[in-house]
Image (spheres, rainbow, N blue to C red):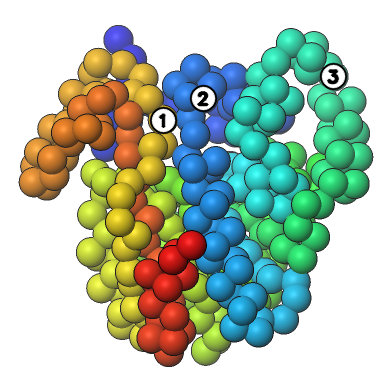
Amino acid sequence: MTELDKTGKIVLDHVYNKPDPRPYFSALQAFDYSIPGEAAPVFRQVIAALRETGETQPLNLVDLGCSYGVNAAILKHGLSMDELYGRYAGAETADLDRDILIARDRDFYTDNPADPDLEFFGLDVADKAIDYAVETQMLDGGIAANLETGALPDTAAEPVSEADLVISTGCIGYARQSTLKKIIEAGDGNPPWMAHFVLRMFPYEPFDDLLSEYGYVTEKLPGTFRQRRFASAAEEARVLDNLAALGIDPSGKEAEGWYHAEFHLSRPKAAAEAAPLERLFRH
């Protein structure tokens, strides 16, 4: 029987912190993991809106729960999920020595910044994943830290304090309010925008309440975004039970066999009033 965690999700700890990303992409491809690709157009709209406010270049992004730097590979380096699966889950790299894979990746990511004016700093509990992403320059920087149980490390304080935008694609719910609080307070009066894709089985209201205490206004984009297929009937049944307990109708979404996430954008009040969410996504 497939092991489930306390939230009902399949346990994939065995692929989240390997010396390179091949096991990660090979495992997740089987479930059509797609949320970073689904999220990318939304993030690009948010990045464009930030640039319109006159923020200096480059923009500093913190990716919360960044794993191997997937969001950076897409947003900064211009890859798609299919291209990432081809690079890491295909036969071409299956037998490569890790050092050769790292050298190949470093050459690629150094030479192919689709958006060179983005600086990506990653935070994740997986030290090997962070190390790989930084060593290959998929991420510009990063550190392994568990902000649920400890303080923000001194080595992360400066890049987090300089963040213009904090993003995540599935971390919120596992990371709770204490994590966001530490990130906000590191800003020292310069609150970053927050752009989070959150699975529907994780209520966002507690995060909204916390953010409002720091002067944020949170808006939710209409609709949902597919994260991945359920890995088993047991996983699907648990998630549907979780949604039923929250009074959420899964029809046409989770009932069709997919996790679905919602997008929440939290900004300081002045920024939210100057450009409401519907204006950011009017095109």
Viewer-nearest residue: 8 or 56: 56
Question: Dot 2: within a 10 Å radius of its alpha carbon, few (fewer than 14), some, or many (20 or more) residues?
Answer: some
The mark that comes first in sequence, 1 or 2, is 2
- Residue 90: name its quadrant: top right
Residue 157 in the image: state x and y as whole percent. Answer: 63, 72
Residue type, numbered disc 1: Arg
Disc 3 marks which residue?
A: 97
Ranked by sequence position, the earlier of labels 2 and 3 is 2
Q: Earlier in the sequence, mark 1 or mark 3?
A: 3
Q: In the image, 27: left or right of 162?
A: left
At x 25% / y 34%, what residue is drawn?
253
Q: Residue reaching furthest front? A: 283
Q: Do the residues bearing badges 1 and 3 touch, measured as CB atoms within 8 Å?
A: no
Q: Is residue 70 visible?
A: yes
Q: Is residue 129 visible?
A: no
Query: Label 2 is placed on what type of residue?
Result: Leu
Quarter occupied by the N terminus: top left
Closer to viewer: mark 1 or mark 2? 1
Residue 213, image x, y percentages: 31, 82
Q: Quadrant of residue 21?
A: top right
Q: Secondary structure at mark 2?
A: helix
Image point 61% across, 33% down: which residue? 81
